[in-house]
Image: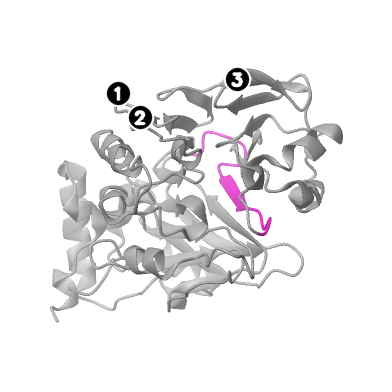
Amino acid sequence: MLSPCFRTVKTMKKRIGFTGIIAALWGAALLCGPLLRPTDSCAGQSEAALTPSPVSRPAADSPSGTMRIYMIDVGQGDSALVIFPDNRTMLIDAGERESAPHIIDLLKRLGIRTLDFLVASHGHPDHTGGFARLIAEGYTGSSTTAYSWSNREWDGITWHRVKPGDVLHVSAGATVTCYAIGSRVVGGAYVVPERNINARSMVLNIKYRGFDYLSGGDLTGSGNHPNVEDPVGDALARAGVEIDVYKVHHHGSRYSSNLYFLRKIMPEFAMISMGDDNPFGHPTRAVLKRLNDPGVHVTRIFQTESGDGATAPNVTVAHGQIVVTTDGVTYRFAGEGPGSTPFSYGPYPVDEFAGSWPMFRRRNS
């Protein structure tokens, strides 16, 4: 095993400018000293011990200066609430119809009465079933914009069709960009979906300053399913997007999260939404193995529930909501809400600043 001075961080594997070289030299110098390990041991460590140099931190350009993403526990389904730095809100998917009360409980606890944006990743009921209840109970209004795969009236509101390359929202340093939908990918790639609705899923990169979160519904890319993940991975790599947190496609199904795609996006952390005792064996052993492949090796995998499949040593089960909070330079994870397992991990550096955090490494060489 090489000494800590020879361990690399993810940013060293990608293009490095002058600032990257300086950060790397600074990191190498510190790396020869005591080493902090932001994995399990990060929970409870002092912020002072983990905060990067102040020169790397941009000034806040919004009142809160933070963005939060809640992965809502909707059982065997998907739903995520994004609260942007300007406090505008976006709900991506809404679980099954019976999951709506869980979403409403969260909105009530957070004091949210009207959602600014709704996003339906694709047409399966475990992603869209809860929208009707939310709309019926007044969580949308004239200011709400709804996005989906087509222009249509649905549940009493108009949904706007999204195309690859569309920017769904820009505010206070945050952007939401569509990289794929309907099996069409930014840059012109098209994969015949073969009547597979999952292959048509909307892929969004949610970015705040240096932080990147990827959400892609039930996108396919493995087995005998249409491989839309490969061109998506290529498009993200061409755009220079460095994923910090990956919302694992299709609840950890073996038909998604293929190795080529994962090695293109190189996520630092993964989050999986699935239900206990689900009939699909989610999350699958194949996906957890790929997430922990030596060429990928995410630091930690967070799950809303235990599921009914495999597990791995670096899995943390929330038994409820998971919230990611970021200021665009660092980000952290926590269990959220009544009944959820209390945990706290981080802060971690976004990829752009990982070189100045010598303790943040992907693996031992």
Outermost residue on the bottom side: it is 1
Looking at this view, is 17 or 253 the one in front? 253
In what quadrant of the picture does the N terminus appear? bottom left
Under mark 3, the amino acid is His
Residue 157 position in % (x across, y down): 74, 22
Identify residue for label 3.
160
Q: Where are the magenta residues, as a range?
A: 60-75
Amino acid type, callout 2: Val
Query: On screen, 26 above or below 310?
Result: above
Badge 3, how many Cα within 10 Å: few under 14, some, many 20+?
A: some
Q: Quadrant of residue 364?
A: bottom left
The residue shown at (29%, 34%) is: 235
| Disc assigned to residue 185 | 2
- Which residue is denoted by mark 1 in the rendering? 188
Name which of mark 1 and mark 3 comes first in the sequence: 3
> Mark 1 near mark 2, Cβ–Cβ under 8 Å?
yes
Say if mark 1 contacts mark 3, CB within 8 Å: no
Structural distance between the alpha carbons of marks 1 and 2: 6 Å
